[in-house]
Amino acid sequence: MGTKFSVLLLLFILFPLALAQLKVGFYNSTCPRAESIIGQIVAKRFNTTASVTAALLRMHFHDCFVRGCDASILIDSTNTTQSEKDAGANQTVREFELIDEAKVALEKECPSTVSCADIITLATRDAVALSKGPFYAVPTGRRDGLVSNPDEVFLPGPTISVSDAINVFAAKKLTVNNMVALLGGHTVGVAHCSFFEDRLSNFQGTNAPDPTMDPALVAELKRICSGNNDPTAFLDQGTPFVLDNQFYNQTLFKRGVMQIDQRLASDKSTSGIVSGFASNNAAFRLRFAEAMVKMGSIEVLVGNNGQIRQNCRVVNQGKPLSSGNLGQGKPKKPVDQPKPKKQKSKTKRQKPKSKKNPKNGKK
């Protein structure tokens, strides 16, 4: 109880501006059971697949880093207009159906009240707690965006340099400490072999593995990646289903799977933070909760901005849109996700061959 109280107190001290717009318990009077309904649905899904936490972390990250935390990632493409879902970086995002289920339940409980953006945020928080990560208070009151454009999806890829990654996060008002803590979400994630296979045998055209990767890990990943259909590997080889600090310990022993993950442990800008988290799980939990709340306040829509979507996949009818008629009309039937393509070492994500910070890693 003392630890939880200290986390909540810290969050209230650090984020007065965000909390002036958002509010913990925003739905207490308008939809009192909102958070418990979402939590029950997440728990049911969690009992089916442990990967739900990684999927929701990625969805939350991909949503907030494009137009802010406005659930624009949930909007389906139509027969005439593409949405963020069509962007290569988002072909690895999963668990849209979980958000749909929560929205249906909430519309029955309290119609047109709880935003899809808040559902993503609350569902992610609950999944983190179920993975033995920290439970933190989530300020709510976000409204949903009206625009979803695949051309606006620019996300940091797995081969990005630490300095470039710092700049990307800084543009969203997130500190270096926030960045390192958020990338710690990889502790419960997986990545397709196509995102890191260049490190296993022909790193940067050398015809040899990446020298910064443990040879034993190289051998293990080669075995995993020898299968068909672009297999996946855990990003944390120690405790892949627990949101803890073991991800950082892995990188200290050259066992970071994604290149950016390993670079965090060696770059002078981040190595001290990595070492600190590796030796202190309580510090990681505190900073991870802090970073999640801060990320969840990026460019949010509040008050009369945006809307409360009745269907998270479609912008409400009759609302003026800023970009064509996105969300109007019948959405296209969801299609199978394609594989990700090879990605260049740029902050702009390239269209994937298939999962995590395209050719990504988050969450």
Image: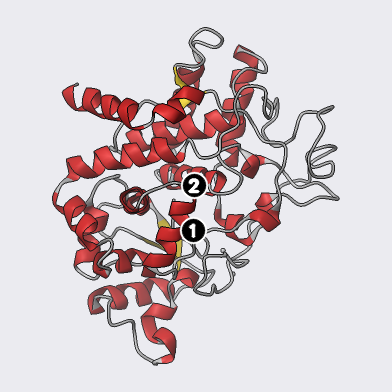
Left or right: 92 as drawn, with respect to 135: right
Give 98 or 78, whichever is nearer the viewer. 78
Asked whether residue 238 is in view, the answer is: no
Give the image quarter of residue 44.
top left
Left or right: 147 as drawn, with respect to 60: right
Residue type (three-letter) at the residue carrying disc 1: Asn
Q: Is residue 201 above or below residue 324?
A: below
Q: Secondary structure at mark 2?
A: helix
Alpha carbon separation for disc pair 2 and 1: 9 Å
Asked whether residue 172 is in view, the answer is: yes
Give 311 or 26, whichever is nearer the viewer. 26
Residue at the farthest front position: 17
Residue that appears at 27% across and 29% down: 10
- Numbered tag placed on residue 357 in the rendering: 1
Position of residue 338 measured from the top left corner of the image (x, y, whole percent): 63, 62
Q: Could you tell me which quadrant the N terminus lies in?
A: top left
Left or right: 167 as drawn, with respect to 306: left
Residue type (three-letter) at the residue carrying disc 2: Phe
Position of residue 179 measured from the top left corner of the image (x, y, whole percent): 37, 52
- The scheme the figure's colours follow is secondary structure
Position of residue 184 measured from the top left corner of the image (x, y, whole percent): 32, 52
Q: Is residue 209 above or below residue 92?
A: below
Residue that appears at 72% across and 42% down: 147
Look at the numbered discs 2 and 1 and tell me whether their residues touch, using CB distance below 8 Å: yes
Q: Dot 2 surroundings within 10 Å: few (below 14), some, or many (20 or more)? A: many
Q: Which residue is mark 2?
A: 61
Q: Mark 2 vs mark 1: which is more N-terminal?
A: 2
Q: Secondary structure at mark 1?
A: loop
